[in-house]
Amino acid sequence: EHPDLFLAFVSWFDIAKDALGRIDDVLQKSVSHACEWETSAVEAIAPETVAREKRVGAQFSFPSRYFDPSYAGPSRVFVARTMEQGASTGAFGWPERSSAEKGEAILDAAADEVAAFIREFKSWPLIQPK
């Protein structure tokens, strides 16, 4: 009924992953729960909500080429687990490295990438099946 309608689903951390990885002094290379990226972003937006003394992430090595249960790096497979199975604090990666300055840089880079995608997306031609 709406052949000219496109729906796109994206997360800010996926669409901006490359740009976020180029930010100085950001160790985290992919997003995880309450990690350096998320905690920095929250510190930039609402610093009063971050319990700085509790910023401790789960990092550990795991013998797999496909899955990183600490979410410190990207995984090629998703494995469903409860929070308790991975992080006693509820945080992964390096939230202790977070800062409001990093958060501003992260949010700026993410906003730039999302805006660039929207500009491109609205110019896409209709896909005509052959």
Image (cartoon, rainbow, N blue to C red):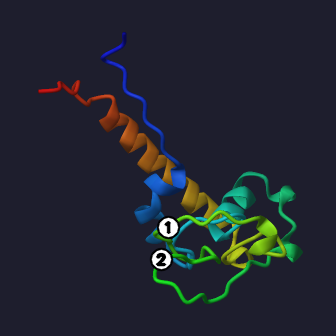
Q: Tell me where residue 61 appears, x and y as whole percent.
A: 61, 89
Q: Viewer-proximal residue, 104 or 79?
A: 79
* Residue at 27% across, 29% down: 123
The residue to which callout 2 is attached is 66
Q: Looking at the image, do the residues carrying marks 2 and 1 touch, with CB atoms under 8 Å apart? A: yes
Task: Kindly identify which numbered label has been placed on residue 77.
Answer: 1
Q: Tell me where residue 120 appears, x and y as whole percent.
A: 30, 37
Q: Tell me where residue 50 appears, x and y as whole percent.
A: 83, 62
Above or below 10: residue 83? below
Check the picture and name the quadrant holding the N terminus.
top left
Q: Seen in the image, is 26 located left or right of residue 46?
A: left
Q: Quadrant of residue 53?
A: bottom right
Secondary structure beneath label 1 = loop
Q: Viewer-proximal residue, 70 or 119?
A: 70
How far separated are the C-alphas under marks 2 and 1?
A: 6 Å
Q: Amino acid at mark 2?
A: Tyr
Q: Tell me where residue 76 appears, x and y as whole percent.
A: 46, 69
Is residue 109 shown to the viewer in this render? no
* Residue at 48% across, 56% down: 14
